[in-house]
Amino acid sequence: MELKLCLMGLGNVGRELIQLIERKRDEVQAQYDLSFKIVGIATGRHGILIDPNGIDHAAALDGHWADRAWPSTEENRLKMIRECGADAGASALVEMSPINRETGRPALDYLELALNSGMHAITANKGPVVHGYRHLSALAKQQGKAFLFEATVMDGFPLLNLYRECLPATHVLSFRGVLNSTTNLILTLMEEGKSFEEAVQHTQDIGIAETDPSNDIDGWDAAVKVCVLSNVLLGADIRPQDVDRTGIRAITPEMIKAAQLARHKWRLVCTAEWVDGRLTAKVAPEEVPANDPFFRLYGTTSAIQIKTDTLNQLTLLETAPTPAQTAFGVLADLIAAARGHF
Amino acid sequence: MELKLCLMGLGNVGRELIQLIERKRDEVQAQYDLSFKIVGIATGRHGILIDPNGIDHAAALDGHWADRAWPSTEENRLKMIRECGADAGASALVEMSPINRETGRPALDYLELALNSGMHAITANKGPVVHGYRHLSALAKQQGKAFLFEATVMDGFPLLNLYRECLPATHVLSFRGVLNSTTNLILTLMEEGKSFEEAVQHTQDIGIAETDPSNDIDGWDAAVKVCVLSNVLLGADIRPQDVDRTGIRAITPEMIKAAQLARHKWRLVCTAEWVDGRLTAKVAPEEVPANDPFFRLYGTTSAIQIKTDTLNQLTLLETAPTPAQTAFGVLADLIAAARGHF
């Protein structure tokens, strides 16, 4: 079968996705009798390109298509989704636009329109999952389509698909994770002797922190991930402002040194659990001892521990994630959607 | 839908499975519109019981059925599978007989007959996977049925289902794991000051090692698991005798102490990787440093690291497994089979 793709956004992850689809073409065909055809791409800079016959991958990556593109307007983005959905055959929206922490829009609207147009809805954007998980899941179920978002947490490491496919009839009781790469790298660099400011500067220099790094440093990114996981794994319905959130600004070199003397390390730890019928969700720096699996998480590595009523505790560690790994999360979702495994 | 089950063997895992099915009945019904009916149980001690109308769970567990049972003969076991398969509707063989390391039989024959009778084939027994993976997988595919065996490695922790459902189009390049609980507990007890003999005695006292503990101590159980994982994840086709195998008999209290002084620990480590077109598979004690995730594996806990071409390295740790967790692996397989997710 052929799955037509409509890409909303073409940043690092989108570009890696195109290359991954190219690299895995033969395997996907052989393993799942499946091929992908990119029929729409919406970018901010180069406009919106639609071609029902398929957009050449090299052309998509070089972006020299101004002569054929529609202007990057909101109306044209919605029109792109409608046209892709109206086309016969199976299709999916791959939503990779920047996060809107407060409302999840317009990404939420794109995904809703895609599902209403008979497309699968895949996103790498945490915003619509935080703000629209229940609504979009119910809509997807009603339409018999997939709403999947593996790439939103731990960069494509199988966590949400693992929960859905490999932990049936399981209650997640709580989780505990180190889920923000930038702060973990900052703390690692401070352990190596850098000041907070030097460490932040380094994460900006290598391109993993934004110009305004407060999204990471103040724990907002971690809080958003806590919402995704709480709403999906724990059946909660919380928003970032519901998370008890403390960032890493108050961590001083002296605190780092004191922790090292005690053979401890500071990590920005995310936790959530149900206590007396109320969800307690928290992001805060924690001094972890040497026998904690988070002790040896260096640099951009993430990890999560999940307590369940069927398997006791699962601990999952990813190593040195890249945008290519996030793109793999999207690919895994697309294949699950095409196979009907959702 | 209803899935009829035929249980081959009723030891710890089988008994836990019956209780888990009972405990999760409402959730499985609500989540997957699925119920289970046990229509056949074959035991060594209490004979073989068949009832197309369903065997009462309490009666199955108390085993007082001698008046209704067939004798425990090989012929009657095969007859039980044939009768279950001949029955209309979906059915599965749950194969939980003791392992035959050399040939995988008769379990392999039971699973083959089940598939040929139109049943799903689920096993918690490593033998038929080591010796029949390619054959049984091909047969299952041809029959449109599932051949699943999550419970064979890491006690039901999602590893094989994770590979199949969450790592599509992925090449596993190598793996490294601590996969035998008994030896890990023995090494942990020796770190606490016990002699090798005392530690072995303790694992026998608590019922996790057999009267002849050589299956664990000499690395045979680990080697069998290496075969399962090499054949499934790495596309190899090896048998236990192909694994370069060293057990833990030669580990002395002096070696344990020397390792502790260096802040190291002895672990029985399983590894496999392709080197120049040839699979290298090994089980051997390894002195691991403090920053190795295997360093802090205490007692019966297991772990695995998997290197892939899509997600770099995944590390998975289970904590304090029980027979109930192994039973969960079987339940996860049964649900995957019923959903057609295989």
Image (cartoon, coloured by chain):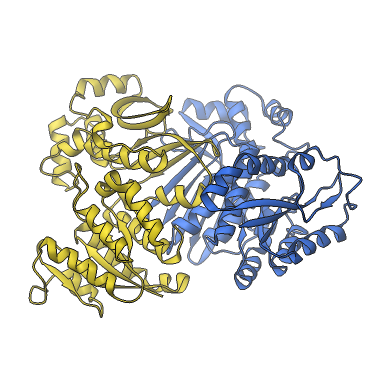
Chain colours: A yellow, B blue
Number of numbered labels in the structure image: 0
Q: Residue at x 47, y 44 (%)?
A: B316
Residue A180 relative to residue B131: left or right: left
Q: Is residue B298 above or below residue B229?
A: above
Is residue A30 visible to us here?
A: yes
Q: Can you say which quadrant of the picture contains the C terminus of chain B?
A: bottom right
Q: Is residue A164 above or below residue A213?
A: below
Task: State the image coordinates of residue B43 (x, y, percent, origin top left).
Answer: 81, 48
Toward which corner of the image does residue B26 lie, by quadrant? top right
Residue B130 relative to residue A41: left or right: right
Q: Residue at x 18, y 31 (%)?
A: A194
Q: Residue at x 63, y 67 (%)?
A: B140
Q: Can you say which quadrant of the picture contains the N terminus of chain B?
A: bottom right
Q: Is residue B117 above or below residue A68?
A: above
Toward which corner of the image does residue A301 lie, by quadrant? top left
Is residue A155 visible to us here?
A: no
Residue at the bottom extreme of this rendering: A53
Residue B96 relative to residue A33: left or right: right
Task: State the image coordinates of residue A74 (x, y, percent, origin top left).
Answer: 13, 60
Task: State the image coordinates of residue A13 (x, y, percent, origin top left).
Answer: 25, 58
Task: State the image coordinates of residue B63 (x, y, percent, origin top left).
Answer: 82, 40
Toward which corner of the image does residue A148 lie, by quadrant? bottom left
Which residue is more in the foreground, A12 or B40?
B40
Which residue is more in the foreground, B62 or A157?
B62
